[in-house]
C-alpha cells in the first residue's frame, strides 16, 4: 500500500516536470513496480525523492 502511494507521488512529480499529464500516471505505476522489487531500499529511495521535492516547493514559496 505504501509503495503504491509513493509510486503515485513519484509519477506525479515526473509528469509535472515533463508536462506529460497522463503519462506521469503510467510512469508512477512503473515506478511503483520498480520500487517494490527493490524492497525496503526502494521505498526509502522513493520516499526520499518525494520528500526532497516537497521541501524544495516549500522553500520556493518562502
Image (spheres, rainbow, N blue to C red):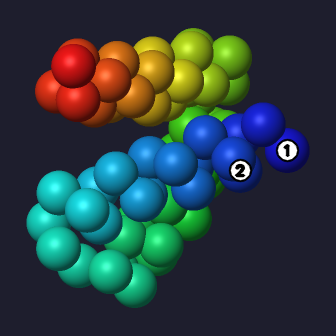
Among all residues in the image, which is located at the extreme right? Answer: 1
The vertical placement of 2 against 17, above or below, is above
The vertical placement of 11 against 56, above or below, is below
How many numbered discs sit on the rendered protein? Answer: 2
The vertical placement of 27 against 51, above or below, is below
State yes or no: discs 2 and 1 in contact (Cβ < 8 Å): yes
Q: Nearer the viewer, residue 51 or 36?
A: 51
Instruction: Name the residue tied to disc 1.
Output: 1
Q: Is residue 31 rendered to the left or right of residue 41?
A: left
Instruction: Name the residue tied to disc 2.
Output: 4
Q: Which quadrant of the figure contains the C terminus?
A: top left
Q: Nearer the viewer, residue 32 or 37?
A: 32
Secondary structure under the numbered disc 1 in the rendered image:
loop
Q: Tell me what residue is drawn at x 34 percent, y 51 percent.
A: 13
Secondary structure under the numbered disc 2 in the rendered image:
helix
Q: Tell me what residue is drawn at x 52 percent, y 48 percent.
A: 9
Q: Nearer the viewer, residue 33 or 26?
A: 26
Amino acid at each position: 500500500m505504501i509503495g503504491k502511494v509513493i509510486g503515485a507521488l513519484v509519477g506525479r512529480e515526473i509528469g509535472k516536470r515533463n508536462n506529460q499529464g497522463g503519462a506521469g500516471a503510467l510512469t508512477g505505476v512503473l515506478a511503483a513496480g520498480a520500487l517494490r522489487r527493490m524492497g525496503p531500499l526502494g521505498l526509502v529511495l522513493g520516499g526520499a525523492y518525494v520528500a526532497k521535492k516537497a521541501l524544495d516547493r516549500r522553500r520556493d514559496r518562502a
